Image (cartoon, rainbow, N blue to C red):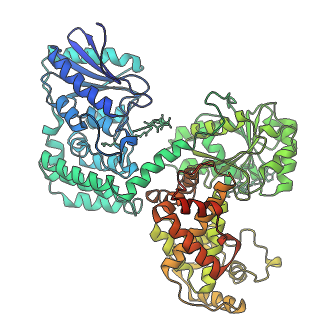
């Protein structure tokens, strides 16, 4: 190999005989920053001018180009050459261009690879156009080129989900031309060998844009698109980007390449400048920011978690255990008796058997990683134990006393409590530094959020380990401080209190639920209560008609489980219908409370549900319970169904305007009273200074 030539700050040119290699080195993910684009363009041009007989585009580090540099979006005109000029230089090169792929070729990265004449990849490589998850569509020709290689049905699926596909699937689908066995180090040699073969065998300079066979199969087939739209309607409700992606693929099927590109360009710009993509891009960076904990150094030593203990195999314990065995970490589950243990383990097995992504063999492998026991001393060799017994402080404290006796020194002791004081739990042990909250959400094997709760004495290593293990098991982790309900439930409580109040004033449960559904939540508080069961925590003997919920339980309304709750449920379809009996019970209750009912507008419902949450979020920031405003948004998007295209409550509040919200809160506080309408001084001061909640960090 001759001496490498620096082409730009992140691209260099190397030479191996007749083959030039354009090498991208822009850590961490080789995003297409302006200097990468410039370097690729200059590298291709220079390699051709220098007489290379073929060109390999390859990347240093952990991955091929993982997409456009998202941090450049919304920052005005791009510096240097545009991506399209790079792509034209590759596609129109007079010698074969081969993309050599390892890691992930995503978004603009895959779109670059689609402009090579050939693509080779290592077995472990992944490919995808995930722009939809940023509220976008592939804006560098991907919408027109991908369907030309893999066909319309697969392109529709890939682009509306953003799913990453494997090398094997990519080879089968026609996306790549060769798979290289071995690790990424073998890729360079294999790509050079492919390039030499392209020269000696005079392989044609295949341009994806010229291919027609696969898109022709869907030309004029309107039904294909109608059916596809219907199939994804429920999942994509409220989102603009999936529909725009589909329109681009329709254009790919029905229009010449350049006309399709124009459709793509127009729709891309519309999404890029709109509020949904701004919110989704914000959410992308917010999730990553949440991993950074001030004062915890990157190289903080982590507890090596090779074996996990879970106490309690109920609703939460079983799901928590599944997270660990899914990534190959063995789990010991301890229950209080054999019957409860059998029941818990059988639910875990059923969950696996029901899952379409787990084969029968995998079910057995995963179950084999779980050891059931009714003896807590089996936790002795666990590196970490997560307690998930009933929500009762005295019980949790007695259990932590026992764990303190049993567990080895240095083991991490976590509680899955959803509201109790982690410090009080830690205080009964001789090692409060090892204790922390790990608040999983139900169903724990499905829900993305992990709200980690740092106790006053939790050590840096324990804090860092909970975040790292969260990432390992595929969760989105947020570190919060101790207070009743932590971040998520504390804010949810405010919303719930106002929802209860409004139905007494004259709004109906269906109206309240519908306002939240239209906003983008999967369901409102009353549907949610019916789903969970109205009788959770309700005791017939102690019931005194003091809340609507008690009144409903007293009238035999237990929620979805018996077909009657705030709504009445169809026994076959489970469809919910508002019930005049419930409305009458609410009216009677309101009369008993001396509340005069009136019409409540949808706008008032929305403001009274969400503004107290914004206010509470600001108080949470004031008290330093959350590290930064964006962490609160990560909690709400990943744990409570806040629509990601509205960013989260802090981002949303900023988009409405904090001064407007403060004015409304002051108005409601005056007319309604109640502690949760007391204005947060932080919110007031940010509104006055033109500051933002989403960027606030105390
Ligand atoms: N632009 C800018 N920064 C990016 C980036 C991107 N496309 N992708 C990742 N990063 C940054 C992250 O913010 C993070 O920075 P930090 O360390 O300062 O927090 C760092 O790179 C590492 O990212 P992750 O923590 O996510 O690393 P992982 O190894 O877990 O995941 C990944 C790697 C799978 C590449 C993941 O980062 C990812 O999915 N990235 C986004 C991919 C994407 O959406 N590409 C499409 C972009 S839009 C586009 O290409 C438009 C085009 O059509 C014109
Ligand atoms: P659950 O009632 O379904 O399960 C609790 C399990 O703990 C039962 O199987 C019980 O037999 C077992 N148990 C009780 N005492 C025990 C003991 N001394 N030794 C061994 N096992 C014992 O309760 P769930 O819903 O799983 O909740 C557990 C914890 O998780 C609670 O702290 C709860 O607040 C929290 N949580 C619950 C969520 C939910 O949606 N259910 C969400 C997030 C947290």
**Is 396 on the left or on the right of 582, as rendered?**
right
Name the residue located 45 percent from the left edge and 30 percent from the top edge: 28
Frontmost residue, 326 versus 279:
279
Is residue 119 at least partly visible in the picture? no
Residue 662, given in percent of the width and then of the height, sits at: 56, 69
**Is 419 on the left or on the right of 350, as rendered?**
right
Residue 409, given in percent of the width and then of the height, sits at: 81, 30
**Is 324 on the left or on the right of 84, as rendered?**
right
Vertical comparison of 590 with 228: above or below? below
Vertical comparison of 635 with 519: above or below? above
Total labels drawn: 0
Residue 314, given in percent of the width and then of the height, sits at: 71, 54
Vertical comparison of 404 with 575: above or below? above
Q: Quadrant of ligand 2?
A: bottom right
Q: Quadrant of the N terminus?
A: top left
Residue 22, given in percent of the width and then of the height, sits at: 28, 21
Name the residue located 59 percent from the left edge and 87 percent from the top edge: 583
Frontmost residue, 236 versus 623:
623
Vertical comparison of 203 with 403: above or below? above
Name the residue located 55 percent from the left edge and 56 percent from the top edge: 693
Is residue 92 at least partly visible in the picture? yes
Frontmost residue, 206 versus 506:
506
- Quarter of the image for residue 328 reads top right
């Amino acid at each position: 190999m001759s001496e490498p030539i620096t082409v730009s700050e992140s691209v260099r040119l190397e030479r191996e005989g007749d083959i030039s290699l354009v090498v991208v080195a822009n850590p961490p993910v080789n995003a297409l920053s302006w200097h990468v684009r410039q370097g690729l363009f200059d590298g291709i041009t220079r390699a051709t001018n220098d007489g290379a007989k073929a060109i390999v585009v390859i990347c240093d580090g952990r991955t091929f180009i993982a997409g456009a540099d998202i941090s450049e979006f919304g920052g005005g005109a791009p510096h240097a050459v545009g991506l399209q000029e790079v792509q034209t230089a590759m596609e129109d090169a007079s010698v074969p261009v081969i993309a050599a792929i390892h890691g992930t070729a995503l978004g603009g990265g895959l779109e670059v690879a689609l402009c090579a004449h050939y693509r080779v990849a290592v077995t472990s490589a992944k490919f995808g156009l995930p722009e939809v998850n940023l509220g976008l569509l592939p804006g560098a020709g991907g919408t027109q080129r991908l369907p030309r290689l893999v066909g319309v049905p697969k392109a529709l699926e890939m682009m509306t989900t953003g799913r990453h596909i494997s090398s094997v699937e990519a080879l089968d689908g026609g996306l790549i031309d060769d798979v290289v066995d071995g690790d990424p180090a073998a890729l360079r040699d294999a790509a050079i060998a492919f390039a030499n073969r392209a020269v000696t065998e005079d392989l044609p300079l295949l341009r994806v844009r010229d291919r027609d066979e696969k898109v022709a199969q869907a030309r004029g087939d309107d039904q294909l698109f109608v059916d596809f739209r219907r199939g994804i309607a429920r999942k994509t409700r409220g989102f603009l980007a999936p529909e725009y992606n589909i329109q681009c693929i329709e254009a790919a099927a029905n229009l010449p390449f350049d006309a399709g590109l124009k459709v793509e360009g127009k729709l891309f710009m519309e999404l890029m400048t709109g509020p949904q993509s701004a919110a989704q891009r914000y959410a992308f960076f917010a999730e990553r920011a949440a991993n950074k904990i001030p004062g915890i150094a990157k190289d903080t030593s982590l507890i090596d978690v090779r074996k996990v203990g879970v106490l309690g195999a109920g609703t939460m314990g079983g799901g928590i255990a599944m997270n660990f065995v899914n990534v190959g970490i063995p789990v010991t589950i301890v229950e209080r008796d054999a019957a409860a243990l059998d029941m818990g383990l059988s639910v875990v097995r059923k969950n696996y058997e029901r899952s379409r992504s787990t084969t029968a063999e995998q079910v057995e492998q995963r179950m084999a990683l779980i050891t059931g026991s009714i003896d807590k001393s089996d936790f002795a060799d666990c590196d970490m134990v997560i307690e998930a017994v009933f929500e009762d402080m005295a019980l949790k404290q007695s259990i932590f006393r026992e764990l303190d006796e049993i567990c080895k020194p240095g083991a991490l002791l976590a509680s899955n409590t959803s509201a109790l004081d982690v410090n009080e739990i830690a205080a009964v042990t001789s090692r409060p530094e090892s204790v922390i909250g790990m608040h999983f959400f139900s169903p724990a094997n499905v829900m993305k959020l992990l709200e980690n709760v740092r106790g006053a004495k939790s050590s840096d290593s324990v804090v860092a380990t909970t975040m790292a293990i969260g990432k390992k098991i595929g969760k989105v982790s947020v570190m919060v401080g101790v207070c009743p309900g932590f971040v998520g439930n504390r804010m949810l409580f405010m919303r719930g209190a106002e929802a209860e109040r409004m139905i007494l004033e004259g709004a109906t449960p269906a109206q309240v639920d519908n306002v939240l559904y239209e906003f983008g939540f999967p369901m409102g508080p009353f549907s949610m209560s019916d789903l969970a069961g109205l009788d959770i925590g309700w005791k017939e003997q102690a019931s005194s008609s003091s809340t609507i919920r008690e009144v409903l339980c007293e009238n035999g309304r237990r929620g979805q489980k018996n077909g009657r709750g705030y709504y009445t449920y169809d026994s076959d379809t489970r469809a919910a219908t508002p019930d005049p009996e419930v409305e009458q019970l609410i009216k009677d209750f309101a009369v008993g409370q001396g509340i005069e009912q009136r019409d409540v507008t949808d706008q008032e419902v929305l403001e009274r549900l969400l503004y107290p949450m914004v206010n509470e979020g600001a108080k949470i920031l004031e008290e330093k319970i959350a590290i930064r405003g964006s962490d609160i948004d990560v909690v709400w998007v990943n744990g409570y169904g806040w629509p990601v295209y509205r960013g989260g409550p802090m981002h949303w509040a900023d988009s409405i305007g904090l001064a407007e919200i403060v004015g409304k809160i002051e108005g409601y506080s005056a007319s309604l009273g109640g502690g949760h309408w007391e204005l947060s001084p932080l919110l007031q001061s940010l509104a006055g200074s033109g500051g933002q909640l989403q960027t606030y960090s105390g």
